[in-house]
Image (cartoon, rainbow, N blue to C red):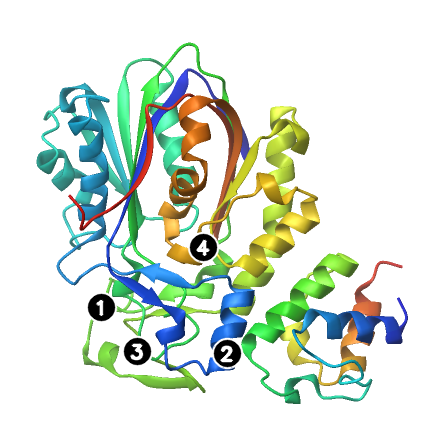
């Protein structure tokens, strides 16, 4: 069973926080001028946001969540559950979600735990929270989702360094008997674990002096074993093979067609991947928003970031039928069809601005 | 799709590539400015036009444009 549904759960609000510092692909000297142009045209990234050394993903998520409290969208005491989805936690242990329970002033009866997923993480996070909320025993939950990917990429690795930006999001979900069902289709394939991997630093290969040794992998690609390694061709092939069937399965499980969906919001991996998927499925450009040009690949924050960046006004004023899709590291991928109804906020803001 | 059409469409995928740059025996990795992004462009081109998803090792086994064309023909359902 990879398709399932949840009932009685709706998204109330969304916020996404990005760091203020902008890095442009046209300042990345490891690529020649022609390569920079080709990168921008093909991968679609012009700029991305990079967090300062002292700012973590949880700081970005914390600021996103505080927006709900500061703007009276909810109160800390209403939150029964907080899930932090990230691959850049504050510490090896304890769970970052537990630290955020305290920092956000949530009550001690709050369930709080971390989920280690990347590009598919937003959809997984929604599925976990929707399952908790749907019985009515929990009333409100926070999904805190994002990554500080720039901590693990190495500047001399042109196959990964220019791709990733940092972002942290917060999504407020609520038990709501008027909500439309959410229809999920979720998948995993650990055989592809090496396609995106940080090999050293956890228990399989604990950190050692070898982790720091910088090796030449191929021309323009130098990194150590503590850095993120990405096999672009394998990821590309995976995405082309798996994402469109996953979207079709989700539509089928929901009894809907492409025409019933107002917007398809896909993980912002790479413009060429996303455009190839769009053309395969025959989705109109207008229903397929992008944020990758100015923010890069922001891991599990990319879906809510794209929603806030492109669709803020529609999310606030309209009822929307959306298909959200995440795919990548794991390998792990999934989609959800859900309806939003006049969100209380859908805001993208800058960490460094008050 | 015949070889000539395949070549002309593939040339169209690469920005600013003058017509006639690619010949059946052209080693496509030797084209000026070749980078790993071009490999992705080829994979996307084959996927959209033939509904065949090539992987990295499929591509590694090819050298020339006609190798690529033959690979696609082999992988097409009969």
On screen, B32 above or below A122?
Answer: below
Q: Residue at x 54, y 58 (%)?
A: A271
Residue reaching furthest top?
A177
Instruction: Choose top left, top right, bottom left or bottom right for residue A175.
Output: top left
On screen, A263 above or below A148?
Answer: above
Q: CA distance from mark 3 to mark 4?
A: 27 Å
Left or right of A293, for residue A246? right
The x, y position of residue A272, in whole percent, is 58, 60
Q: CA distance from mark 2 to mark 1?
A: 36 Å
Left or right of B25, for residue A53? left
Residue A34 visible somewhere in the drawing = yes
Q: Which residue is mark 3?
A: A224
The x, y position of residue A122, in whole percent, is 39, 41
> How many neighbours does mark 4 have within 10 angstroms: few (below 14), some (14-19), or many (20 or more)?
many
The x, y position of residue A47, in whole percent, is 38, 62
Q: CA distance from mark 3 to mark 2?
A: 24 Å
Do marks 3 and 2 share a subunit? yes
**Chain of the residue that carries numbered disc 1 in the rendered image:** A
**SS type, badge 3:** loop
Q: Earlier in the sequence, mark 3 or mark 4?
A: 3
Tell me the number on the disc at residue A35: 2
Q: Which residue is mark 1?
A: A206
Comparing A240 with A27, the one in front is A27
Quadrant housing the N terminus of chain A = top right
Q: CA distance from mark 1 to mark 3?
A: 14 Å
Left or right of A228, for residue A307? right
Q: Residue at x 84, y 58 (%)?
A: B77
């Amino acid at each position: 069973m990879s398709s399932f549904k949840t009932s009685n759960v709706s998204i109330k609000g969304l916020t996404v926080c990005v760091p203020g510092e902008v890095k442009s692909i046209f300042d990345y000297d490891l690529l020649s001028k022609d390569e920079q142009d080709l990168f921008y045209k093909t991968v679609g990234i012009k700029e991305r946001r990079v967090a300062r050394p002292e700012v973590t993903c949880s700081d970005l998520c914390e600021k996103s969540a505080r927006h709900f409290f500061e703007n009276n969208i909810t109160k800390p005491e209403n939150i029964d559950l907080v899930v932090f989805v990230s691959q850049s936690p504050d510490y090896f242990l304890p769970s970052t979600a537990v630290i955020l329970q305290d920092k956000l002033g949530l009550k001690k009866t709050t369930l709080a735990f971390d989920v280690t997923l990347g590009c598919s993480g937003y959809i997984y996070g929604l599925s976990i929270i929707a399952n908790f909320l749907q019985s009515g025993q929990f009333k409100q939950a926070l999904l805190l989702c994002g990554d500080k990917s720039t901590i693990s990429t190495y500047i001399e690795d042109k196959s990964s360094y220019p791709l990733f930006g940092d972002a942290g999001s917060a999504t407020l979900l609520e038990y709501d008997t008027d909500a439309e069902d959410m229809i999920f289709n979720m998948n995993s394939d650990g055989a592809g674990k090496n396609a995106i991997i940080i090999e050293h630093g956890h228990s399989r290969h604990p950190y050692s002096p070898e982790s720091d040794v910088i090796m030449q992998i191929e021309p323009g690609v130098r990194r150590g074993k503590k850095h993120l390694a990405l096999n672009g061709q394998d990821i590309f092939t995976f995405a082309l093979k798996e994402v469109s069937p996953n979207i079709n399965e989700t539509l089928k499980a929901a009894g809907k067609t492409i025409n019933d969906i107002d917007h398809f919001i896909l993980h912002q991996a790479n413009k060429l991947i996303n455009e190839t998927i769009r053309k395969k499925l025959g989705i109109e450009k207008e229903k397929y928003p992008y944020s990758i040009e100015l923010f890069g690949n922001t891991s599990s924050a990319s879906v809510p970031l794209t929603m806030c960046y492109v669709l803020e006004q529609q999310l606030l004023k309209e009822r929307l039928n959306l298909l959200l899709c995440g795919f990548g590291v794991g390998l792990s991928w999934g989609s959800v069809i859900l309806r939003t109804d006049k969100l209380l906020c859908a805001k993208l803001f800058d960490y460094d601005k008050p | 799709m015949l070889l000539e059409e395949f070549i002309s469409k593939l040339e169209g995928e690469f920005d600013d590539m003058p017509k006639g740059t690619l010949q059946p025996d052209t080693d496509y990795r030797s084209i000026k400015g070749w980078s790993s992004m071009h490999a992705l462009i080829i994979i996307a081109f084959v996927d959209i036009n033939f509904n065949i998803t090539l992987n990295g090792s499929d591509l590694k086994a090819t050298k020339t444009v006609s190798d690529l064309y033959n690979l696609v023909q082999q992988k097409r359902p009969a």
